Image (cartoon, rainbow, N blue to C red):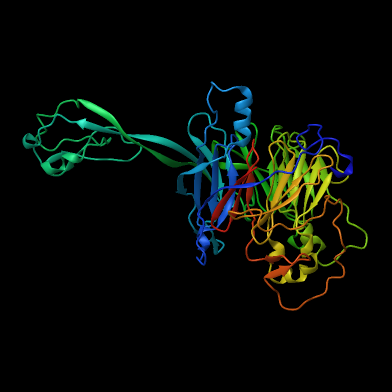
Amino acid sequence: MNGGDKVAAGGVPAGPPQPLDWKFSQVFGERAAGEEVQEVDIISAIEFDKSGDHLATGDRGGRVVLFERTDAKDHGGSRSDLEKMDYSMNRHPEFRYKTEFQSHEPEFDYLKSLEIEEKINKIKWCQTPNDALFLLSTNDKTIKFWKVQEKKVKKISEMNVDPSKATGNGAIATSSSSGNSGPHIANGGPSDRSYSYLSNDFSFPPGGIPSLRLPSVVVSHETSLVARCRRVYAHAHDYHINSISNNSDGETFISADDLRINLWNLEISNQSFNIVDVKPANMEDLTEVITSAEFHPTHCNTLAYSSSKGSIRLVDLRQSALCDSHAKIFQEQETPGSRSFFTEIIASVSDIKFGKEGRYILSRDYMTLKLWDINMDSGPVATFQVHEHLRPKLCDLYENDSIFDKFECCLSGDGLRVATGSYSNLFRVFGCSLGSTEATTLEASKNPMRRQVPTPSRPSRTLGNSISRVVRRGAAENTSVDANGNSFDFTTKLLHLAWHPSENSIACAAANSLYMYYA
């Protein structure tokens, strides 16, 4: 790392590892050439669970789709440790579609005359005490707590009833509802004998059924996945929710909007505690907003949140109930003479992530990735240029609103690498161990190495060239060409990606398609 850091982001002293050789793994929802993508199908959130065996995506249509890993976790107990290690390093991770459910619907706030989109902003996996899966999903206003569980549908194979002797045209009825477990009688004739499921609504027709006896055989018919909303956390945010984050205590989580961060208990949906409030007494004095927030991975009393001014504040919940003052602030000092109209816009932090051990924080602003050591608030330990070639195009990016795009970032489980997205469905992987020069550009396609872009050999510590001499170029364009002749399309952007918690595997979203890669 630059700045004298002696350890890798995972806290392990190490020399720079070799750059990874990335390969295409699989794609879900790949569109055909020329196929128009529906707005509701565009993926807006991606999240691996803690084990990495499940992956969730949310889209602009309010749906959550779950994927499950299918390749073997252990390749047999008879193999040697060396063979198992070799298999583990070279296996091809594979996921399959598991289920999907409608998490949010479009709403209308009549008090504020405001339409609330169904788009999923964030998904977070929760701790799983049993075989069920638990996750939080949120749109702009409402957070929901979901439980996804397999349910076995049971069926009576023989009912021991003679329909010819039953009065009232009674027949055994079917119910596929997840909570039903007792027989009931439905209207129908003898031909309805195929109706043989169980229901709680047990009733007899007038006169009864003298020949009805206990069923001789009850068998499990099939297994289905059922998603049930356990809690709805609503009416706590005046502004759009941009982040949710689970606490390591397994009991609480936070939700953040532009001006406030609220603390919730998973079991209590009708009240929350406001722990951060940056709203000024006079809204005309507002100078910055909250852009992202996340709990520390192991310290349940610590969280970090970023702002539109490029700062990251570390908060200790033990200090006071309302965390008006921060424990630490991380902000890079502005380079003298570099200030321009765009300085504050591109400094806004769009996403922050803690490293696995919690010592490092990765942040993404418009132009760069920055890695911060929470023990060193003088500046980032490393800065990685994501698309420096776009700096002369900031005027055009401002005119077509691309400069306000919010790119996410992620770290590898071992803390040796970081990744983030860019335009033309490209994403970049950087090595962040001491002395590493790894800077790989990949395209979200079946041939990820197709569009390699030459990059600087070392990550830079500064923001680079001054943008004070930007010249207005007239009408905004949707494409750009860098010094190497590579064209960049501003309409195709890779905003969302996630790194597997324990392996070198990345999932990323390009419009409605989910691409997965491994190294």
Is residue 160 left or right of 333 when viewed as pictured? left
The residue lying toward the viewer, choosing from 249 and 464, is 464
Tell me the residue at 80%/64% (across/down). Answer: 391
Q: Is residue 109 visible?
A: no
Coordinates of residue 140 in the picture (x, y in percent):
58, 54
Residue that extends furthest to the left in the rendered view of this protein: 165
Is residue 32 left or right of 217 when viewed as pictured? right
Coordinates of residue 413 in the picture (x, y in percent):
68, 37
Is residue 237 left or right of 466 when viewed as pictured? left
Q: Is residue 463 visible?
A: yes
Q: Is residue 26 above or below residue 373?
A: below
Q: How many marks?
A: 0
Coordinates of residue 334 in the picture (x, y in percent):
88, 56
Residue that extends furthest to the right in the rendered view of this protein: 336
Is residue 295 left or right of 462 when viewed as pictured? left
Q: Quadrant of the N terminus?
A: top right
Tell me the residue at 78%/63% (across/down). Answer: 389
Coordinates of residue 288 in the picture (x, y in percent):
76, 56
Q: Quadrant of the C terminus?
A: top right
The residue lying toward the viewer, choosing from 154 and 32, is 32
Tell me the residue at 57%/39% (across/down). Answer: 92
Tell me the residue at 61%/32% (across/down). Answer: 88
The residue lying toward the viewer, choosing from 111 and 241, is 241
